[in-house]
Image: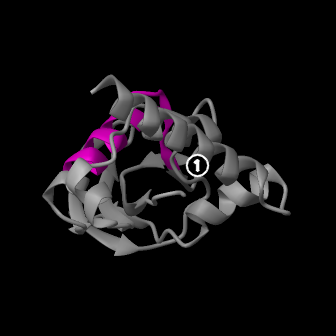
């Protein structure tokens, strides 16, 4: 058991190092690329609609800390590792007007074990204080998807 945990931690930190240091692009641009494909929907008149934001919701400590917090202590499902399963789980989140995670749901599944780990990761990331999304200088509720990537190394 401890051997599996140690192996996972080594893989996790290797992934983070690759994610943050191996890109020829500056780190902030690399992080922006992680979220650039995200489409935000704003809450208006009781429903979510496409719209422009002045400021997207983000962790006060920054996107890097959000990603590190999110992926920290995430366990790669043992059955998935044995079968060589890799991929991305997408989670739709709703962040309210005070920057709190209001809800989360799987929109692209990789299997139950992966989905559970991805949901735990999202909730762990949103334990950080968040700035809410802003539109017209007012905080606004938004909905968007966050990809959680599972990749085996070596």
42 is higher (above) or lower (below) than 74? below
Residue corresponding to mark 1 = 15
**Label 1 crowd bin: few (<14), some (14–19), many (20+), radius 10 Å:** some
Q: Nearer the viewer, residue 150 or 37?
A: 150
Residue 128: % across, % down = 46, 28
Magenta-highlighted residues? 116-133
Q: Quadrant of the C terminus?
A: bottom right
Please state if 81 lies on the left or on the right of 9 as rendered.
Answer: left
Q: Residue at point 38% right, 42% down?
A: 97
Residue 96, visible in the rendered structure: no
**Looking at this rendering, what residue extends furthest in the bottom direction?**
50
Magenta highlight on residue 123: yes
Q: Quadrant of the N terminus?
A: top left
136 is higher (above) or lower (below) than 69? below
Count of labels shown?
A: 1
**Looking at this rendering, what residue extends furthest in the top direction?**
2
User: Label 1's element?
Assistant: helix
Q: Nearer the viewer, residue 105 or 116?
A: 116
């Amino acid at each position: 058991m401890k051997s599996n945990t140690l192996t996972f931690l080594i893989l996790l930190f290797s992934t983070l190092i690759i994610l943050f240091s191996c890109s020829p692009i500056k780190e902030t641009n690399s992080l922006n690329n992680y979220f650039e494909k995200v489409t935000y929907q704003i809450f208006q008149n009781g429903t979510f609609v496409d719209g422009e934001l002045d400021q997207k919701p983000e962790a006060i400590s920054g996107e890097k800390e959000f990603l590190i917090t999110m992926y920290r202590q995430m366990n790669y499902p043992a059955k998935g590792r044995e079968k060589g399963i890799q991929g991305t789980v997408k989670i739709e989140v709703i962040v309210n007007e005070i920057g709190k995670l209001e809800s989360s749901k799987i929109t692209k599944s990789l299997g139950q074990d992966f989905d559970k780990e991805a949901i735990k990761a999202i909730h762990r990331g949103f334990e950080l204080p968040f700035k809410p999304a802003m539109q017209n200088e007012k905080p606004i509720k938004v909905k968007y998807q966050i990809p959680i990537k599972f990749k085996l190394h070596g």
